[in-house]
Each structure stands twice: as C-alpha cells, then as structure tokens.
Amino acid sequence: MKSDLDRLMKDQNIDALFVSGSSMHNPPMYYFTGDVHLTKADLIKLPGKDAVLFYNYMERDEAAAAGLTTRPLDDYDIRPLLEETGGDLLSAVALRYKHMLADLGFDSGRMAVYGQMDAGSSYGIFSRLAELVPGLEIVPEAGGLEIAYASGESLLMAARETKDEAEIDRIRRMGTVTVEVVDRTAKFLQSHKVVDDTLVMEDGAPLTIGHVKSRIDLWAAELGVTNPKGCIFAIGQDAGVPHSAGSDDDPLRLGQTIVFDIFLQEAGGGYFFDFTRTWCLGYAPPEVQAVYDDVRAVFDELMAGLVAGASLSQLQTHTCELFAQRGHPTIETHPGTTDGYVHGIAHGLGLDVHEAPSARNEAGALKPGVVVTVEPALYYPERGMGVRLEDCIAVHPDGTIENLGEYPYDLVLPMGM
Amino acid sequence: MKSDLDRLMKDQNIDALFVSGSSMHNPPMYYFTGDVHLTKADLIKLPGKDAVLFYNYMERDEAAAAGLTTRPLDDYDIRPLLEETGGDLLSAVALRYKHMLADLGFDSGRMAVYGQMDAGSSYGIFSRLAELVPGLEIVPEAGGLEIAYASGESLLMAARETKDEAEIDRIRRMGTVTVEVVDRTAKFLQSHKVVDDTLVMEDGAPLTIGHVKSRIDLWAAELGVTNPKGCIFAIGQDAGVPHSAGSDDDPLRLGQTIVFDIFLQEAGGGYFFDFTRTWCLGYAPPEVQAVYDDVRAVFDELMAGLVAGASLSQLQTHTCELFAQRGHPTIETHPGTTDGYVHGIAHGLGLDVHEAPSARNEAGALKPGVVVTVEPALYYPERGMGVRLEDCIAVHPDGTIENLGEYPYDLVLPMGM
C-alpha cells in the first residue's frame, strides 16, 4: 500500500519516482492525487519525502484539492526552454524536468517513470532527459503492460498490490453498486414478454444487447458510477469468446448462455469492481447445464479452499487440474486451446481493472491487503456457449477472506413469472 | 484526414507508423479501429499499405469488427521471447515488435510511435527496439503532449486535424446532444425554488453543484453518450479560474457567474464536443453584466468575421486587441496575468477534446475540414467572477463555416417563472 513506498524504494534501490499525465484515467497519477481534475501534471517522489505535484496554474484549485505539496509548472516557463532547445518541444520538456528534479535536490540516481502518456512522446522526453542528466539512470518497468500485471514488474504496482482499509471500503462500495446493477439487469430481462423464444419490447420489436447495455449505462449513472470500458454482455457464440463484448444488434433468445461481465468504476477514474455471472433465459439446455455445473462445482471448491497467503499460480494449476478431472481441455493440458478453460483464475483489481497480483506470476499470492477476482470458466465457441463465474475477494490483515459483492449464481433466469 | 496518411508519411519521410495500447480512451488506436473493445493491441501502417492490427486471440471478434487487416499477437508467443531475453519482459516485447515489423517487410527506416501507454514501459520497449534493429530510427513526436496540440508536432495529429464529412457528422450529433443536456440543465435549475437567494430542493436543502453534475451524468447516459472527464460547473470565484471544475458542495446562489463548460464524448471513446455558456441565476449584478457584455461583443465580432483559411494565431492576436480596447488585461499585454483574457481563442477537437489546430501555433488555420472551438472569455478571480462563451465550428470544403451546436447566449436564467 502507499505507506510501503519508501520501503519499496529502498529495497529496489530506486532514488526517485516520476509520474506524468492527467489525474483522470491515469492510475499512477490518481494513486497520488485522488479524484481531482488535472488535465496534465507531473509528480516527483523522493525517498522519505512527500510527493510534490507540479500543476498548471490554470488548474490551481484542482491541484490544491489533491492535498499534496504543490508547485506551479508555470515556474518552469516552456518558452525560454524552447529557445534553448532550438524549438524542439520534447527537449524543452526534458529540460524542464531536469530543472524540476534539480530544484527538489535530485541530480543523479535511479528513477522509475510512470503515467499514461503518448508512447512516442515518452520515449522522446525520457531519452533526452537521460542525455541531459549524466548521473540519471531511468529504470524502465513493465508494470504498465497489460500483459504483465504482476507486482514484480513495477515498484508502484507493488505498492498498489495491497490495499488499505479505506481502499477496500471503496471497492466494497463498488461491489454493492455492481450487484445492484446486475440485479436490475436480471429483473429488466425478466420483465419482458417472450415471442418465438425471443424477448420482445412493448412495441413488439426484439430486445437487443444494445438496449440492455444502454440501461446498464443509465443505472450506472443513476448510482453515481461510470462504465468507462463498457461491459461484456455476450450471448451464444460470442459468450464462447472470453473478451467478446457482445453484439449490440443480437436479440436475446431463450436457452442460450449469456456471459455478463461488468467492471464499473468510481466516477472520476477511481476504483473498479469486476464481476461476472452467466445466465440462460427461461431454461438451460442439458449440455449447457452440464458445463455450468462443472464451472459452479470448481468455483465452489476454489472459494471454499481459499486461505490467506496461498499462491495464485498454484491456484491456477489447481483450477486446471479440477477442470481436467471433469474432462475439459485447459491451457495447461492443451496450450493455445480456445476450448475449455483458457485464462487465468485470478487477477488483482483496484485503480486498474487488471492489476497485481496475477495468477500468471510466480509471486502472486493472497497476501493481506490484496483484492482479487476468482473466475473459473469454460468456453466452447464452436458449440455456441461459454460459462464464467467471477467474484471479488479481499484478504484482510487478520487473514479473513471477504467476498466483496455477493449475488446468487443461478444459471437460469426464469421468464414469464 | 485519414486519406492523407500516405501523403504525410511521404512528405515527412516516415517509413512506418506504430500505434500501441487499448482501442478505448486511446485516440491514435481508435482513429484506426473505431469503436471496438480491444484491451491491448498493436498496429503498424506502412506507406501505401493498409494498417495491420495485431490483436490478442481472446479478443478476435472485437478485432474483426475493426474491419482492418488483422494478425493474432499469439503468433508471436511471448514465452520463448522471454527465455531469449533472460526473463526481461520489456526486451521480450521489443523482440516481438522486431519480428512483427520484419514480417511486414520493415527492417529499417524512420518510424513514428503513438498510443497511450505507461511512460516507463514505452521508454523501455522502444529504447530496446532501437538497439535490436540497427537501421531503425524512432522519430519521437510531441503530438501526445497536452502542451502541444499542434499539427506540426505529429504526423498522426496532422492527419486528424482535418475531418471528413462522416467525422463532422459525428461531432455535429454530439453538438445536438450537448445542447440538449445544456437545455435540460437550464430548465432543471429554473425548476427550483429560491430561499434567501439560494436554490433549494423539495426537502428544503440547498441545491449544490454536486447535484447538478449528477443530473448531467444521468442525462448523458440517457442520451447514450459519456462524460469521461466530468464537466466544469463552477460558480463565483471558481468561475474565475479557467480550469476549476467547481466544488461539489457549493450551493447555487443568485447573481453569481456560473461557467458551465461541457465536453461530452461518444460512448466507447469516440468524438468529443466542447461547449460553454455562462449563466447568472435570477439576475446579473451590473459589474457582471458589463464583463459579460464585453465577452459577448467580442464573441459576436469574432464569429461574424470567421473566414475559411484564416490564421488562428492572428485570430488570437485580434481577440487580445479587442479585449484590450475594452480595457481588459490580456496574455499579450500582461504575460502571466490571471485577470482578463488568459487563454487561447480556439483549439481543434475530435477524438481528443484538445487537438490540432491550435491558436498557439503559427500554422493553426481554419483549413477546410477543421473543427475548432471559439471561446473568448474574461476572468476576475479576485472579484469572484468569470465569463466564457464557447461554440464549435466546422469549416467545410466549400469554405462555409457551420456552427455545430447552436444555443442561446443569455447570461441571466430567470428564476421563479
């Protein structure tokens, strides 16, 4: 958690953290500033000292609301720096950063760099900064790569991997909101008439996934949260593809699997929740029920067996074993398979919907303070089906494990009640 | 526009464009893929050839929906690459990129790099890629810097600077939605009772800015658009600070300036609109009315004088002159002032709310295809007031100038009607 930053910097021999970009939709900056509206800012954290936020003077009130030590970027006027660099903006920004670092007393050492920024601009600025400050070593980290949401890849991600109680409170609140939206969605679906095995609206037109997603966005707004990445609401063959978001024009038909994976976020770019249920409207065909029963049995066995400190990669292997015992291909028995169990069993979540720890990393574990998903699943795209169940759990300092958003797991949503 | 890419690559001697990151909230990727849900993808564009999208196999349906030439990233399995690089993930990704480029026939030349990514990861990957491919020159561009939304800074931004009719249609549609939300907001405010010069709700509690912003989010969702950056709804002294978003707990009082700057975006991370009105509830004190009258007069004069091809930096100078003639300080007469006219008169908008052209760049002009704001304003934070008016205009190929979202400019919103 944030209070670990100084220790982590010492352990990893990092002499400065440099964070850049907006405070919105930019987790590394938000982690320090909280929910304020800064279009563009820079932040420097040195060991044993408070982070210093550099802001544009036009945004001085927003910067003040962050509650950090602040300095106006306007003190480092870009115009003379542009003259000094012959009009090269990337070099001028690098020079500005050199001056900012120097004014905080940093002129050499190992610096880690974070923040969502344009890739070309980052490469340009930090290459030039490394040239301008001979004693500076920029330590690139892979923590920003979706492929690598593992604490070992990034100091800042290692801090974010464990949450304090205030952070867990916020995620729990998002769990409550998420369950409310899921429940409204179920009741909304069930409120429709069925004609020829298809849900229809008042005007007789088929209810589509696009209609359902619009309602979800509306309920999210009503409840004061956001749905920045959209949700997965995929039926039939789409449900058999883990990250297919679903097709807006698809009608909702009885007896097909619907994978509903929803990842709402606090307004302003704060904490996420991540939650999945699989539904069949009206009835479940026997082969769907059988696949669901296997996922549900594995889910129950995994949830019952969770203990603080457990290794996530072992949980992944265990999940593969359980599915293999039930006759399903898995990525361990059939690398590259798109049938059966094809993804990770768990990932952390917080300011990113995917963050450390990861089941794909040896070090991933149910350490006190982590918040992770548990999401066994089976996919059979050729058979037009997919089943995933996903809850979020928090591990508390006393070792207890809390389910942050409880909701029934039923496969069939009865229609025409 | 997009059809200019090959010409721009030739003119600027760029042999490859490389775009990385999500398709969501990442304009360079969205520009190619459109509204699809790709968590992480890479895209390479070579001269005279279609862009090629590299996607994760789990997201194959979403990738297909982009309508581009596609290849699965899974063909470049990261595991053997990690073995080759001794477990260094950034080097493994760089090696993957080398292979991807080679398979498209690119092994040397000048490559521009784009996409919202973690700054440290970008620096790490592209530094290593430059080492791995001796003939490769990575051309860093400043187009991703908020400070520099000017076409000269980036090839891709230069393409995005001019819009085709389909893009202008989408922005115009966002204008219609924006005006609808602004009108609902006005009527919502006017529907309230006033007690002691303060708007109150049914239960007698003061109506606050937080309440108004919640409604705005709700209406945006109802109308199928998003409000990813929040809006500015700032009263009194906050209205005097250009980028102050307003304080949620502030009550709405009569006779104070409210700057309402709203920048809604298409769902999924598409096109923005940008629009500002300034209101006084009930009445305007004479000194507020006088400041408003000056902004309005300048606004009307500027709008009446817009002609296709005109220089934006000359428009900026002209705006400063007009305000100076009326006795106000400006950033040209008083550099660094926070009183008077303190910012740019125009900026482009599209997939970013701020993009090329810019009034701060010599090359910025009302070229056919540009969509820009026109936003004269006066700020007097010490006097507790600010006034800004902002419309969006498009310049059509035949030279006509279209206002993309018309709405009354009235300062006073009458109460108790």
Image (cartoon, coloured by chain):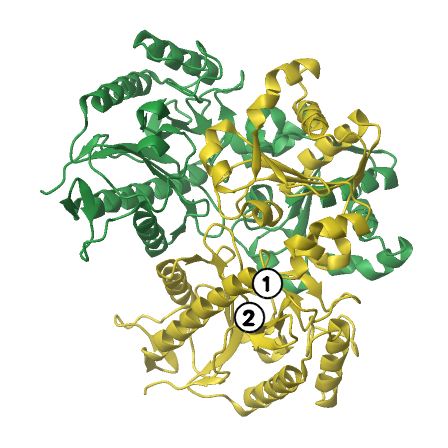
Chain colours: A yellow, B green
Which quadrant, please, contains the C terminus of chain B? Answer: top left
Vertical placement of residue A86 versus A395, above or below: above
Q: What's the chain of the residue with tag 1?
A: B
Q: Residues within 10 Å of mark 1 (few under 14, many from 20)?
A: many
**Residue B111 visible in this rendered orientation of the protein:** no
Amino acid type, label 1: Asp
| Tags 1 and 2 touching, CB below 8 Å | yes
Q: As rendered, which of B105 and A247 lies closer to the eye?
A: A247
**Residue A150 visible in this rendered orientation of the protein:** yes
- Residue with the mark numbered 2: A238
Amino acid type, label 2: Asp
The answer to whether residue A6 is left or right of residue A109 is: left
Q: Quadrant of residue A43?
A: top right
The percent coordinates of residue B319 (x first, y second) are 38, 14
- Residue with the mark numbered 1: B61
The percent coordinates of residue B268 (x first, y second) are 48, 52
The answer to whether residue A147 is left or right of residue B269 is: right
Q: Residue at x 72, y 31 (%)?
A: A124
In space, the residues marked 1 and 2 are separated at their CA atoms by: 8 Å
The percent coordinates of residue B187 (x first, y second) are 20, 45
Q: What's the chain of the residue with tag 2?
A: A
Q: Residue at x 63, y 28 (%)?
A: B8
Q: Residue at x 46, y 47 (%)?
A: B228
Q: As rendered, which of B328 and A256 lies closer to the eye?
A: B328
Q: Quadrant of residue B388?
A: top left
